[in-house]
Image: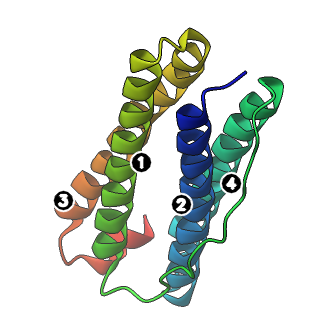
Amino acid sequence: MMDAKIERALNKQINMEYSASYIYLGMALYMDTEHLPGFASWMVSQSDEERTHARRLLRYMLDRNGDVGLESIPKPKVEYDSVKAVFEASLEQEKNNTQSINDLYSLASELNDYATQAHLQWFLDEQVEEEKSIIDILGRLELAGNDQTALLI
Protein backbone atom coordinates (compact mmCIF):
# COMPACT_ATOMS: atom_id res chain seq x y z
CA MET A 1 0.00 0.00 0.00
CA MET A 2 1.31 3.44 -0.93
CA ASP A 3 1.62 6.15 1.66
CA ALA A 4 -0.98 8.87 1.05
CA LYS A 5 1.73 11.56 0.90
CA ILE A 6 3.59 9.71 -1.85
CA GLU A 7 0.34 9.07 -3.68
CA ARG A 8 -0.53 12.80 -3.66
CA ALA A 9 2.99 13.76 -4.73
CA LEU A 10 3.02 11.22 -7.56
CA ASN A 11 -0.36 12.47 -8.76
CA LYS A 12 1.00 16.02 -8.72
CA GLN A 13 4.02 14.89 -10.76
CA ILE A 14 1.81 13.06 -13.27
CA ASN A 15 -0.18 16.26 -13.73
CA MET A 16 3.05 18.23 -14.10
CA GLU A 17 4.27 15.86 -16.83
CA TYR A 18 0.99 16.11 -18.76
CA SER A 19 1.08 19.89 -18.39
CA ALA A 20 4.67 19.95 -19.69
CA SER A 21 3.54 17.93 -22.68
CA TYR A 22 0.88 20.50 -23.46
CA ILE A 23 3.35 23.38 -22.99
CA TYR A 24 5.75 21.75 -25.46
CA LEU A 25 2.88 21.37 -27.91
CA GLY A 26 2.19 25.10 -27.59
CA MET A 27 5.87 25.75 -28.25
CA ALA A 28 5.66 23.55 -31.34
CA LEU A 29 2.74 25.63 -32.59
CA TYR A 30 4.80 28.79 -32.17
CA MET A 31 7.71 27.24 -34.09
CA ASP A 32 5.34 26.25 -36.88
CA THR A 33 4.00 29.80 -37.14
CA GLU A 34 7.62 30.97 -37.44
CA HIS A 35 8.18 28.50 -40.31
CA LEU A 36 10.73 26.49 -38.35
CA PRO A 37 9.60 22.90 -38.87
CA GLY A 38 12.78 21.39 -37.40
CA PHE A 39 12.26 23.19 -34.08
CA ALA A 40 8.54 22.38 -34.22
CA SER A 41 9.34 18.70 -34.68
CA TRP A 42 11.77 18.80 -31.74
CA MET A 43 9.06 20.33 -29.55
CA VAL A 44 6.51 17.71 -30.62
CA SER A 45 9.01 15.00 -29.70
CA GLN A 46 9.45 16.63 -26.28
CA SER A 47 5.67 16.75 -25.89
CA ASP A 48 5.44 13.03 -26.66
CA GLU A 49 8.27 12.30 -24.23
CA GLU A 50 6.55 14.16 -21.39
CA ARG A 51 3.38 12.12 -21.94
CA THR A 52 5.50 8.97 -21.82
CA HIS A 53 6.94 10.12 -18.49
CA ALA A 54 3.43 10.70 -17.14
CA ARG A 55 2.30 7.24 -18.26
CA ARG A 56 5.39 5.68 -16.69
CA LEU A 57 4.50 7.24 -13.32
CA LEU A 58 0.84 6.38 -13.77
CA ARG A 59 1.70 2.73 -14.50
CA TYR A 60 3.94 2.63 -11.43
CA MET A 61 1.11 3.88 -9.24
CA LEU A 62 -1.30 1.32 -10.66
CA ASP A 63 1.28 -1.45 -10.13
CA ARG A 64 1.45 -0.41 -6.46
CA ASN A 65 -2.34 -0.25 -6.17
CA GLY A 66 -2.22 3.55 -5.88
CA ASP A 67 -5.18 5.81 -6.53
CA VAL A 68 -4.48 7.82 -9.68
CA GLY A 69 -6.22 11.17 -9.83
CA LEU A 70 -5.93 13.03 -13.12
CA GLU A 71 -6.43 16.79 -12.94
CA SER A 72 -7.07 19.40 -15.59
CA ILE A 73 -4.07 21.10 -17.15
CA PRO A 74 -3.76 24.78 -18.05
CA LYS A 75 -3.95 26.11 -21.57
CA PRO A 76 -0.41 26.39 -22.99
CA LYS A 77 1.22 29.58 -24.15
CA VAL A 78 1.59 29.77 -27.94
CA GLU A 79 3.05 33.27 -28.37
CA TYR A 80 6.72 33.98 -27.69
CA ASP A 81 9.08 36.84 -28.45
CA SER A 82 11.72 34.68 -30.11
CA VAL A 83 13.03 31.18 -30.65
CA LYS A 84 15.51 31.80 -27.86
CA ALA A 85 12.67 32.81 -25.51
CA VAL A 86 10.98 29.48 -26.23
CA PHE A 87 14.06 27.53 -25.24
CA GLU A 88 14.62 29.69 -22.17
CA ALA A 89 11.05 28.90 -21.10
CA SER A 90 11.66 25.24 -21.87
CA LEU A 91 14.78 25.20 -19.69
CA GLU A 92 12.91 26.88 -16.83
CA GLN A 93 10.15 24.29 -17.12
CA GLU A 94 12.66 21.46 -17.00
CA LYS A 95 14.40 22.98 -13.98
CA ASN A 96 11.03 23.16 -12.19
CA ASN A 97 10.34 19.57 -13.14
CA THR A 98 13.77 18.52 -11.85
CA GLN A 99 13.07 20.24 -8.53
CA SER A 100 9.69 18.53 -8.29
CA ILE A 101 11.23 15.11 -8.89
CA ASN A 102 13.98 15.86 -6.36
CA ASP A 103 11.31 16.80 -3.82
CA LEU A 104 9.41 13.61 -4.59
CA TYR A 105 12.59 11.57 -4.16
CA SER A 106 13.26 13.30 -0.82
CA LEU A 107 9.75 12.48 0.34
CA ALA A 108 10.19 8.83 -0.66
CA SER A 109 13.47 8.82 1.29
CA GLU A 110 11.82 10.29 4.38
CA LEU A 111 9.11 7.64 4.22
CA ASN A 112 11.56 4.79 3.54
CA ASP A 113 9.71 4.05 0.32
CA TYR A 114 12.54 2.26 -1.44
CA ALA A 115 10.44 1.12 -4.39
CA THR A 116 9.50 4.70 -5.24
CA GLN A 117 13.10 5.84 -4.79
CA ALA A 118 14.25 3.14 -7.20
CA HIS A 119 11.56 4.08 -9.71
CA LEU A 120 12.42 7.77 -9.51
CA GLN A 121 16.12 7.19 -10.18
CA TRP A 122 15.36 6.90 -13.90
CA PHE A 123 13.61 10.29 -13.78
CA LEU A 124 16.54 11.91 -12.00
CA ASP A 125 18.89 10.71 -14.73
CA GLU A 126 16.43 11.75 -17.44
CA GLN A 127 16.24 15.30 -16.09
CA VAL A 128 20.02 15.70 -16.35
CA GLU A 129 19.73 14.73 -20.03
CA GLU A 130 16.73 17.03 -20.61
CA GLU A 131 18.39 20.10 -19.13
CA LYS A 132 21.69 19.47 -20.95
CA SER A 133 19.91 19.11 -24.29
CA ILE A 134 18.22 22.49 -23.91
CA ILE A 135 21.37 24.17 -22.60
CA ASP A 136 23.20 22.90 -25.70
CA ILE A 137 20.50 24.33 -27.99
CA LEU A 138 20.59 27.65 -26.16
CA GLY A 139 24.36 27.67 -26.65
CA ARG A 140 23.94 27.14 -30.38
CA LEU A 141 21.32 29.90 -30.53
CA GLU A 142 23.77 32.18 -28.75
CA LEU A 143 26.44 31.33 -31.34
CA ALA A 144 23.95 31.98 -34.17
CA GLY A 145 23.19 35.42 -32.79
CA ASN A 146 21.06 37.39 -35.24
CA ASP A 147 21.98 35.21 -38.23
CA GLN A 148 18.56 34.07 -39.44
CA THR A 149 20.06 31.51 -41.83
CA ALA A 150 21.70 29.78 -38.85
CA LEU A 151 18.21 29.02 -37.49
CA LEU A 152 17.41 27.17 -40.66
CA ILE A 153 20.42 24.92 -40.23
Q: CA distance from mark 3 to mark 4?
A: 28 Å
Q: Nearer the viewer, residue 101 or 88?
A: 101
Give the SS element for disc 2: helix
- Say which mark, if any, is on residue 48: 4
State which mark lies toward you, 4 or 2: 2
> Mark 4 vs mark 2: which is more N-terminal?
2
User: Local crowd at mark 3 within 10 Å, few (<14), some, or many (≥20)?
Assistant: few
Residue contact at pointers 1 and 2, CB within 8 angstroms: yes
Q: From this viewpoint, is residue 79 visible?
A: yes
Please name the amino acid that badge 3 sits on: Leu
Q: Is residue 68 left or right of residue 123?
A: right
Quickly name the residue at label 2. Answer: 20
Q: Which tag is nearer the camera, tag 3 or tag 2? A: 2
Mark positioned earlier in the residue sequence (3 or 1): 1
Which circle marks residue 97 in the picture?
1
| Circle 1: element type | helix
Query: Residue 143, percent across and down?
Result: 18, 59
Classify residue 53 as left or right of residue 150.
right
Percent x, y of residue 136: 30, 46
Rendered image coloring scheme: rainbow
Q: State whether residue 55 is above or below residue 31.
A: above
Residue at figure coordinates x 72%, y 58% from the top left: 70
- Which residue corresponds to mark 3? 143
Q: Earlier along the polypeptide chain: callout 3 or callout 4?
A: 4
**Quick one: label 4, few (<14), some, or many (20+) residues within 10 Å?**
some
- Quadrant (top left/top right/bottom left/bottom right) for the N terminus: top right
